[in-house]
Amino acid sequence: MKTYVVGGAVRDELLGRPVADRDWVVVGANPGALLALGYKPVGRDFPVFLHPDTREEYALARTERKTGRGYHGFTFHAAPDVTLEADLARRDLTINAMARAADGTLVDPFAGRADLEARVLRHVGPAFVEDPVRILRVARFAARFPEFTVAHETLALMQTMVANGEVDHLVPERVWQELAKGLLEARPARLFEVLRQCGALARLLPEVDRLFGVPQRADFHPEVDTGVHTLMVVDAAAQRGFGLAVRFAALTHDLGKGSTPADLLPRHHGHEARSVELAGQLCRRLKVPNDCRDLALLAARWHGDIHRGAELRPATVVRLLEQTDALRRPERFEQLLQVCLCDFVGRLGQEAAAYAIPARFHRALAAVRAVDAGAIARQCTEPARLPERIHAARVDAARAALAAE
């Protein structure tokens, strides 16, 4: 029995990046041998075990065979006669198909190290076309390693897979899982660029794909269409280290512009309502988690009003705070302001320091939250008018705070 460190740990070590965790492949053993050594089984579809001391994952070397459409259409074979090279051959990219032996020897049958040095994402072999998740993984690695390019032959295979309908068999949960991981990478815009290059974006996220080629307002830079602007907003969120919900809302905040009638362009009057509808549609289809969905819907509806914050009267500011539930959920409202900041800087020539809107809303929200609703209730002799009295006090507080600017 021999064990090898495989995959991402080897890749990241060669790149000089931190290695978060290690995966191992075991060659020349069966489940009984590992169980006898105290390993704990955790694999449901194929034999994976946890080391009794380190708790790292050890998988028996295996091969796989395509038996149906989509991600689940595979059968696996794990046995002592499966070689390390056969196990590595089933992997997606050459940079993920390397192993490190116990004596430090690098096992690299598919020239992954050369592709690392050339900064190329290249598929291992023709079996790549059998798993549609690999399209998403390549796009995600492009977002993690933005200096890498996708090999021409790999992109061609991805285009073939899309044309053959393989991506149509991906389950929503897996699409969201890979999308979420990609959004959290260093340059998430690259994920969507690669998906668009191979045609998968139109099949998986048609609401986003329709933004490309749609002009922005006439006063925006002519080279930045709505799709390019959206990706700039997503990358702005990544550059500032904002969380997944903010990055997803950055992606979906302008979806309605993709359905603006041609005779209105480059204006997008009323796109907020369309954006809310399309963001909701996308979230339902991909079964997006509630926190990401809720912020996306808020950003789609309110980002335009927040951008006009300097023009809003105190009463309008208070209504906006109430309707976005900012008084009860100030942390989510802060995320909404983060989306708006990214929307502002996601245009050529705009700097974050020039965006004064968040500070204005911070002052207003702090003043409104300081209003003592209980004290107003104790003094109110007409219970039916209590909401009106509280709202009026909030408007007065916001007016005073904003007048002090």
Image (cartoon, grey):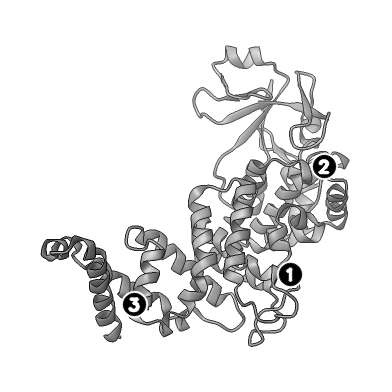
Q: Nearer the viewer, mark 3 or mark 2?
A: 3
Taking 249 as reference, is 115 left or right? right
| Amino acid type of the residue tagged 2 in the rendering | Phe
Image quadrant occupied by the C terminus: bottom left
The crowd level at tag 1 (other Cα within 10 Å; few <14, some 14-19, many 20+) is some
- The vertical placement of 392 against 244, above or below, is below
Along the line of sight, which residue is nearer the eye, 83 or 240?
240
For image coordinates 60% across by 56% down, the residue present is: 183
Image quadrant occupied by the N terminus: top right
- Who comes first in sequence, dot 3 or dot 1? 1
Query: Where is residue 82 shown, x and y percent of the image?
Result: 79, 23
Q: Rounded to the nearest whole Å, what is the CA distance between mark 2 and mark 1?
A: 28 Å
**Cβ atoms at labels 3 and 2 below 8 Å apart:** no
Q: Nearer the viewer, mark 3 or mark 1?
A: 3
Taking 206 as reference, is 183 left or right? left
Report if residue 170 is visible in the image: yes
Taking 33 as reference, is 153 left or right? right
For image coordinates 62% across by 71% down, the residue present is: 232
The crowd level at tag 3 (other Cα within 10 Å; few <14, some 14-19, many 20+) is some
Query: Where is residue 258 shown, x and y percent of the image?
Result: 70, 68
Q: Which residue is mark 3?
A: 315
Along the line of sight, which residue is nearer the eye, 229 or 256?
256
Q: Which residue is mark 2?
A: 128
Mark drawn on residue 212: 1
| Amino acid type of the residue tagged 3 in the rendering | Ala
- Who comes first in sequence, dot 3 or dot 2? 2
The crowd level at tag 2 (other Cα within 10 Å; few <14, some 14-19, many 20+) is many
Q: Rounded to the nearest whole Å, what is the CA distance between mark 3 and mark 1?
A: 37 Å
